[in-house]
Image (cartoon, rainbow, N blue to C red):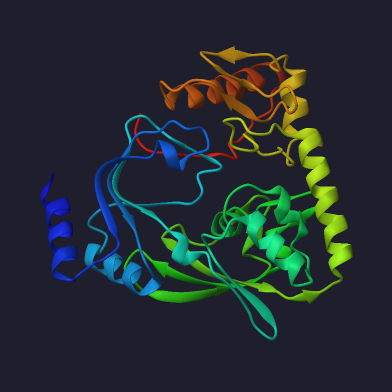
Amino acid sequence: MNENQREFLENCKKNNVIGKIQINHNLSKYTWFGVAGNAEIFYMPPNIEELAKVLEINRDKLPVTVIGAGSNIIIRDGGIFGLVIKLGKEFSQIKLHNDCIEVGAATYDRVLSNYCQKNEIGGMEFYFGIPGTLGGAVRMNAGCYNYETKDVFIKAKCVDYRGQVSEISNSKELFSYRESNIPQDMIICDVYMQKKIASKNAISLKMKEVDDQRKKAQPQQIKTAGSTFKNPKDQTDKKAWEIIEEAGLKNFELQGIYFSSKHSNFIVNNQTKSANIIEDFGEYVRSDVKKKLGISLNWEIKIFGER
């Protein structure tokens, strides 16, 4: 343990930090691939006030990494240096207001969709088909079947890495395809969404349509992490899965890693030895596609940690 780590832990103790802090904590159970390295320091805040306090204590001395549901990440075998933060169940509350919905960033997308169906709020049906949490959905402008997070997002309450609380509002510049311009040193804590009244029956029909399409096209109940690569819209009209198949990589396999038979842009992990192998698989695919077709595939899955 270095001096910065020791000082951080001592200051947390002095300031009566009650959130869960663990040293050299393995992160495998926090990723959908089921394999990952360790966090040097792992912290789960109980509320936004203590999160801000802990970040102020740190004052950028330790690098900070935030993980959500782990539905679209690879955490390399060497683990993540510094402070790893995961928002817990306290950040998964949903509140109805007169003109909007306030949703904790740790709320699962599907939970939000179900809540809105029960309360006759339309526009959130597409979240029924998205894995992960709302904070991650905002961060990457997640979407499916011609709907995106930017279409229903109003604003978010955030805490930066120095412990300052602020709000970020929607704008034309904030979102792009599968990305947002929210600064990387901002932790999304609460999200305010549009409240559009709709009939429960109409919402249910849309949710069923989303779910049917998902079950038809995507693998279920296996170790995957959603779309691996972004659709390269600036290079071709073809989808990433079409490009992968055109390059002859549909049946490519590397040490227990392969593409789902249902969807050639969904990696399946059938091993527990290494997260690095998953990245190696993807990098081979990217290289081979570039060599054969001249198309650059960019990761949609986020990659953290040291090799």
Q: Position of residue 178 (x, y in %)?
A: 65, 50
Quadrant in the picture for the C terminus? top left
- Give the left or right position of residue 115, taking residue 197 as reference: left
- Give the left or right position of residue 230, taking residue 212 as reference: left
Q: Position of residue 42 (x, y in %)?
A: 30, 50
In the current view of this chain or complex, which residue is farthest to the front?
Answer: 118
**Location of residue 168 with respect to 33 vertically, above or below:** below
Question: Residue at coordinates 48% horizontally, 51% vertically from top-left?
Answer: 68
Nearer to me, 201 or 5: 201
Question: Residue at coordinates 33% horizontally, 70% vertically from top-left?
Answer: 52
Nearer to me, 240 or 18: 18
Q: Position of residue 115 (x, y in %)?
A: 69, 65
Question: Residue at coordinates 18% horizontally, 71% vertically from top-left?
Answer: 15
Quadrant in the picture for the N terminus? top left
In the current view of this chain or complex, which residue is farthest to the bottom?
Answer: 98
Q: Position of residue 281 (x, y in %)?
A: 54, 21
Residue 118, quarter of picture: bottom right
Question: Residue at coordinates 66% horizontally, 39% vertically from top-left?
Answer: 230
**Location of residue 9 with respect to 237 vertically, above or below:** below
